[in-house]
Image (spheres, rainbow, N blue to C red):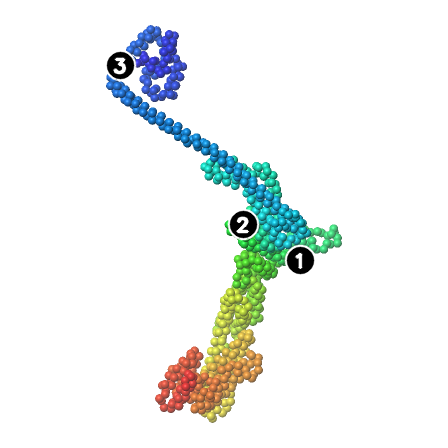
C-alpha cells in the first residue's frame, strides 16, 4: 500500500501528479504537503490518527518520481484492476445485504412521498390561516393606532377646553382680588357682569363680611390654580393615556404620542399669567395666616388654611409657621439672658459725659460691677417680664392654629387638616412648641448659670420671683389652652417648662437647706456648755414656716422645700439625741439642786417642745400631701421630747408616791392625851411639801414656762389621788388620827395652792378649784372622817368621793381586813394595783373580801354599808 499512498491523499490532483512525474519533482510538494497537513490536522484530526505510519512517513519525506510516465501509467492500470477485483469480491460477498438495502430503500421512498404530501397539506393550511388571521390583525392594529391617536387628540382638546374655562374663572377671581386690594369694594357674584361701581371702602378697614368674602375668593382662586396645574402636569396625562390604551390592548409605546398642554402655543401664552396669579395668591394666603394668628381670628385663619389646602401647600405652610414661632421663642429666650446686649442697652440709656475725649472709654462689660448690679438686675427682670408676655402670645397662636387645623376637614375625604399637616411635622404643633420651649429654656438657663455669676446669683436668689412670672405665663394661656397647673394637678407641659428651670431651682433649694441647717447648727453649736433653749426652737420652727410659706404658691417647689424640711428635722433629732442625757442623775430628785443633766435635758426638751408645737400648726396651713412629708420628722421630735420628760415625770410620781406612802408609818391610833403638843403636820407631809417646792423651783424651772404649766395640773391631780387613796386605807384610825389627817390635808392643800399659783401666776384663791374632781375629792375627805356609820352609805353625805374611797373607809372602821391585807400586799402595791386596774376590778376585789366576812359576828353593819355603797357604785337600785 506504500506504492499507492500518494493516490490516497484527499487533495490528490492527477494533473499535478503527472506534471511532477514529467518534471522529476516530488509529489506532493513540500508547501502543499505542509498546508495539506495543517488543514488535515485542523479540520479532520480523527483521520490523521487512522493513517498508517508508512503513509505519514511518505507525506513527511517526499522523494522525486524516479520512473517515467509509462511506468506510472502501468502502475495505475494495475491498481485500477486490483481495485476493481476487490470491489467485485466485496459485491459478491455482500450482494444479499445490498439487495436487502435496495428493497428497503424503495419502501422508504414510498413512505417519504406520503409524508411529503402531508407536509404540503400543512403548508397550504398555514397559508390559509395566515390569510385569515394575520391580515385582519394587521388591519386592526392600524385601526387601534389610529383610534389611540384620535383619543390623544380628543383628550388634549378636552383638557384645553377645561383649561380655558378655568383660566377665565381665574381671570375673574384675579380681578375681584385686585379690587379688594385697591379698596374698591366687593361685588356679589350676580353683579360681576354689570358695570362695577367703585365704592369708597378703605382697603385697610374692610368689614368682617368683606374679610370673609375675600377669603372665599382667595380659596376659589387657589382651587382653580391647583386644577390648572393638574391640567398642565404631564405625568397625569401620561398615566391617563396608558390606562386608555390598555383598554384597547395597545402597548405603552403609544403613550409617547400624548399631547402636553405646555407645548400648545395658545395654552403656553397663559402660563405666565397663571404663575403670577399663583404667586400673588400664595402671598395673600401667607398674609392672611399671619393676620389671623396675630388677631386670633379663627374664621380668617380657617379661610386662609382652606386656601393653602387648595394650593396643596398646607403641610409646608404649617411647618414654616411652626418654625417661625419656635425660632421666635428661641430668639427671645436667648436675648433675655444675653448680658452683652443688656450691657449695651444700659450704656445707651446712660447720660453722656461732658468731656468724652478726656475720659477713658473701657470695653463693654459683660459682668456688672457692684455699682451697676442694680441696673443690670432691673434690666434682667424687665426682659424676663417681656419674655413671658411674648411667650404667652406665641403659645396662644400655636394652640389657635392647632385648634383650627383640627376643626377644618376635607369635605370629600373627611380628613382633618391637622392629619394632612402631620406629613411635614414630627409631632402636633403644641407638642413641638412645648418641646422646643423646654429645651431652649433649659439650655439657656444652664449656660447662664455656668457662664455668668451675676445671672446665677440674681436668678437663684430671685427664683421665687422668676417662678411667679411663669405662673403668670400659665395663667395667661389657660383660657386658650388645656394646660392646668394647680395644687392637685399639673399638666405635663407645665412640668416640662418648670424642669427647664431646675438649674436655678437646685441652687435655691441648696441655699434654703443651707439656711435651715445653719439655724440648727447655730442652736446646737455650743453643745452641753450652752444647750439650745426655747428661743432656739421657736427660731427653727419660724424659719421652717417661712421657707414653706415662701414656696406655698407653687406645689412642686413646696414639695421640694418640704423634703428639705424633713431632712432638717432629722438633723434636729440627731443633734438632740447627742445632747440628751440618759444617766441616772437625769431623773434623780435627791436635791437640793437640779443636776447638770437635768438642766441640760430641760433646755433641750424646751427647744424640742416649741419646735413641735409650732410645726404642728402647719397642718392647718398646708395640704395633707405636703404635711405628710414633714410629719415623720415632727413625730420624731415629739418622740425625743417624750423620751426626756416621761422618765422625769415618772420619777416625780414615784418620789411623791414613796413620800405619801409613809403615811402608814404615822401612828394614827394615839389617845387624846398624847395629842398635847401636836400642832403641826406629819413628817411625811413636810417632806412632801419640801419635795414639791424642790420640783417647782429646781426641776420645772429648767423647762419652759408653758411646759411647766402643762405638767403642774397633772402632778397636782396625781398627788391628790395618791394621798386620798393612802389616807382611805390608813389604819387603825382613832379620833386623834383623824385630826392628824385633817391637819395633813390642810397643809397639803396650802402646798398645792402655792405649787399652782406661783407657776400659773394667778391669784391664790380658787386656784385648786381649776383642778376639778380631784380637788372636790380632797375637800370631801375631811367630813368623811367624822361621819357617823349610818351616814356612810348615803351618797348625798359622801358626794365628791369615789365609791372605792368610801368602801376603804368603811373597811377601816370595821373589823374586816382590807383587800391588800387579805392578799398579803403592801399598801404601796395595792395603790399601784388600783391605778393599773379599772374601778370594776377593784369592786370585785372588795366583794370577795366582804363575802368572806359576811357571816361573821361584829361585821354585819359594815358589810351592809359596804354592799349599799357597791350597789350605788354599780347603779343598782
Q: Secondary structure at mark 2?
A: helix
Cα distance, mark 3 to mark 2?
Answer: 106 Å
Closer to the chain start, of discs 3 and 1, is: 3
Q: Is residue 564 visible?
A: no
Residue 172 visible in rendering = yes
Q: What residue is pinned by disc 1?
A: 375
Looking at the image, which is closer to me, 478 or 487? 478
> Above or below — where is 442 with respect to 596?
above
In-front residue for pair 842/422: 422
Q: Quadrant of residue 518?
A: bottom right
Of the two numbered discs 2 and 1 on the same chain, state the one appearing first in sequence: 1
Q: State which mark lies toward you, 3 or 1.
A: 3
**Kind of element beneath mark 1:** helix
Q: Horizontal and vertical percent for residue 14?
A: 36, 11
- Percent of width and height locating residue 763: 57, 82
Q: Residue at x 30, y 24 (%)?
A: 111
**Is residue 662 positioned above or below 104 on the image?**
below
Q: Which numbered circle lies on residue 421?
A: 2
Amino acid at each position: 500500500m506504500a506504492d499507492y499512498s500518494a493516490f490516497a491523499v484527499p487533495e490528490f490532483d492527477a494533473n499535478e501528479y503527472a506534471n511532477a512525474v514529467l518534471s522529476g519533482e516530488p509529489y506532493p510538494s513540500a508547501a502543499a504537503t505542509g498546508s495539506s497537513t495543517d488543514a488535515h490536522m485542523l479540520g479532520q484530526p480523527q483521520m490523521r490518527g487512522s493513517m498508517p505510519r508508512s503513509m505519514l512517513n511518505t507525506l513527511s519525506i517526499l522523494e522525486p518520481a524516479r520512473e517515467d510516465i509509462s511506468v506510472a501509467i502501468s502502475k495505475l492500470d494495475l491498481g485500477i484492476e486490483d481495485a476493481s477485483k476487490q470491489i467485485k469480491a466485496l459485491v459478491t460477498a455482500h450482494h444479499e445485504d445490498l439487495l436487502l438495502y435496495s428493497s428497503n430503500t424503495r419502501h422508504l421512498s414510498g413512505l417519504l412521498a406520503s409524508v411529503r404530501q402531508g407536509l404540503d397539506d400543512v403548508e397550504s393550511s398555514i397559508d390559509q390561516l395566515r390569510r385569515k388571521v394575520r391580515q385582519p390583525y394587521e388591519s386592526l392594529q392600524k385601526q387601534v393606532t389610529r383610534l389611540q391617536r384620535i383619543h390623544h387628540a380628543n383628550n388634549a382638546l378636552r383638557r384645553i377646553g377645561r383649561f380655558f374655562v378655568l383660566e377665565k374663572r381665574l381671570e375673574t377671581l384675579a380681578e375681584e382680588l385686585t379690587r379688594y386690594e385697591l379698596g374698591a369694594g366687593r361685588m356679589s357674584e350676580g353683579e360681576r357682569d354689570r358695570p362695577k361701581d367703585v365704592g369708597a371702602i378703605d382697603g385697610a378697614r374692610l368689614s368682617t363680611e368683606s374679610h370673609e368674602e375675600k377669603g372665599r375668593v382667595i380659596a376659589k382662586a387657589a382651587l382653580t390654580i391647583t386644577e390648572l396645574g393638574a391640567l398642565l402636569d404631564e405625568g397625569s396625562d401620561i398615566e391617563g393615556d396608558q390606562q386608555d390604551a390598555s383598554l384597547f390592548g395597545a402597548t405603552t409605546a403609544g403613550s409617547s404620542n400624548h399631547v402636553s398642554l405646555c407645548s400648545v402655543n395658545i395654552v403656553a401664552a397663559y402660563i405666565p399669567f397663571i404663575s403670577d396669579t399663583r404667586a400673588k395668591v400664595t402671598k395673600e394666603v401667607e398674609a392672611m395666616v399671619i393676620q389671623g394668628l396675630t388677631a386670633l381670628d379663627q374664621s380668617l385663619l380657617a379661610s386662609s388654611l382652606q386656601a393653602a389646602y387648595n394650593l396643596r401647600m398646607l403641610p409646608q405652610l404649617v411647618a414654616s409657621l411652626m418654625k417661625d414661632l419656635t425660632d421666635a421663642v428661641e430668639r427671645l429666650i436667648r436675648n433675655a439672658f444675653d448680658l452683652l446686649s443688656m450691657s449695651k442697652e444700659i450704656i445707651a440709656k446712660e447720660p453722656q459725659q461732658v468731656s468724652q475725649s478726656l475720659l477713658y472709654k473701657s470695653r463693654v462689660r459683660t459682668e456688672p460691677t457692684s455699682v451697676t448690679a442694680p441696673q443690670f438686675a432691673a434690666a434682667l427682670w424687665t426682659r424676663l417680664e417681656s419674655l413671658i408676655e411674648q411667650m404667652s402670645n406665641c403659645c396662644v397662636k400655636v394652640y389657635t392654629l392647632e385648634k383650627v387645623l383640627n376643626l377644618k376637614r376635607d369635605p370629600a375625604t373627611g380628613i382633618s387638616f391637622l392629619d394632612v399637616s402631620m406629613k411635614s411635622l414630627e409631632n402636633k404643633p403644641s407638642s413641638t412648641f412645648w418641646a422646643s420651649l423646654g429645651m431652649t429654656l433649659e439650655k439657656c438657663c444652664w449656660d447662664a448659670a455656668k457662664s455668668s455669676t451675676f445671672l446665677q446669683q440674681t436668678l437663684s436668689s430671685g427664683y421665687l420671683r422668676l417662678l411667679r412670672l411663669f405662673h403668670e405665663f400659665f395663667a395667661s394661656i389657660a383660657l386658650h389652652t388645656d394646660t392646668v397647673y394647680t395644687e392637685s394637678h399639673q399638666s405635663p407641659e407645665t412640668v416640662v417648662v418648670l424642669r427647664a428651670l431646675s438649674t436655678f431651682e437646685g441652687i435655691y433649694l441648696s441655699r434654703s437647706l443651707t439656711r435651715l441647717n445653719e439655724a440648727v447648727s447655730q442652736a446646737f453649736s455650743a453643745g452641753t456648755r450652752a444647750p439650745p433653749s426655747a428661743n432656739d426652737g421657736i427660731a427653727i420652727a419660724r424659719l421652717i414656716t417661712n421657707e414653706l410659706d415662701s414656696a406655698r404658691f407653687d406645689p412642686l417647689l413646696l414639695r421640694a422645700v418640704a423634703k428639705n424640711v424633713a431632712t432638717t428635722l432629722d438633723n434636729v433629732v440627731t443633734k438632740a439625741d447627742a445632747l440628751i442625757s440618759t444617766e441616772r442623775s437625769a431623773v434623780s430628785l435627791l436635791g437640793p439642786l437640779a443636776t447638770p443633766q437635768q438642766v441640760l435635758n430641760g433646755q433641750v426638751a424646751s427647744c424640742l417642745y416649741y419646735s413641735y408645737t409650732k410645726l404642728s400648726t402647719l397642718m392647718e396651713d398646708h395640704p395633707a400631701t405636703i404635711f405628710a412629708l414633714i410629719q415623720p420628722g415632727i413625730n420624731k421630735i415629739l418622740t425625743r421630747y417624750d423620751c426626756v420628760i416621761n422618765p422625769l415625770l415618772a420619777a416625780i410620781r414615784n418620789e411623791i408616791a414613796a413620800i405619801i406612802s409613809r403615811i402608814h408609818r404615822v401612828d394614827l391610833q394615839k389617845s387624846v392625851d398624847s395629842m398635847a403638843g401636836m400642832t403641826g403636820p406629819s413628817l411625811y407631809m413636810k417632806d412632801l411639801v419640801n419635795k414639791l417646792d424642790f420640783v417647782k423651783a429646781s426641776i420645772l424651772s429648767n423647762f419652759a414656762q408653758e411646759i411647766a404649766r402643762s405638767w403642774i395640773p397633772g402632778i397636782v391631780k396625781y398627788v391628790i389621788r395618791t394621798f386620798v387613796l393612802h389616807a382611805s386605807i390608813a389604819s387603825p384610825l382613832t379620833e386623834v388620827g383623824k385630826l392628824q389627817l385633817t391637819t395633813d390635808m390642810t397643809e397639803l392643800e396650802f402646798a398645792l395652792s402655792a405649787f399652782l399659783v406661783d407657776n400659773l401666776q394667778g391669784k391664790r384663791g380658787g386656784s385648786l378649784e381649776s383642778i376639778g374632781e380631784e380637788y372636790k375629792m380632797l375637800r370631801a375627805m375631811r367630813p368623811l372622817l367624822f361621819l357617823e356609820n349610818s351616814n356612810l352609805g348615803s351618797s348625798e353625805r359622801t358626794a365628791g368621793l369615789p365609791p372605792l374611797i368610801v368602801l376603804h373607809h368603811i373597811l377601816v372602821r370595821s373589823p374586816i381586813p382590807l383587800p391588800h391585807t387579805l392578799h398579803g400586799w403592801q399598801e404601796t402595791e395595792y395603790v399601784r394595783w388600783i391605778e393599773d386596774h379599772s374601778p370594776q376590778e377593784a369592786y370585785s376585789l372588795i366583794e370577795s373580801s366582804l363575802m368572806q366576812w359576811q357571816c361573821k359576828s361584829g361585821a354585819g353593819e359594815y358589810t351592809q354599808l359596804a354592799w349599799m355603797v357597791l350597789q350605788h357604785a354599780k347603779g343598782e337600785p
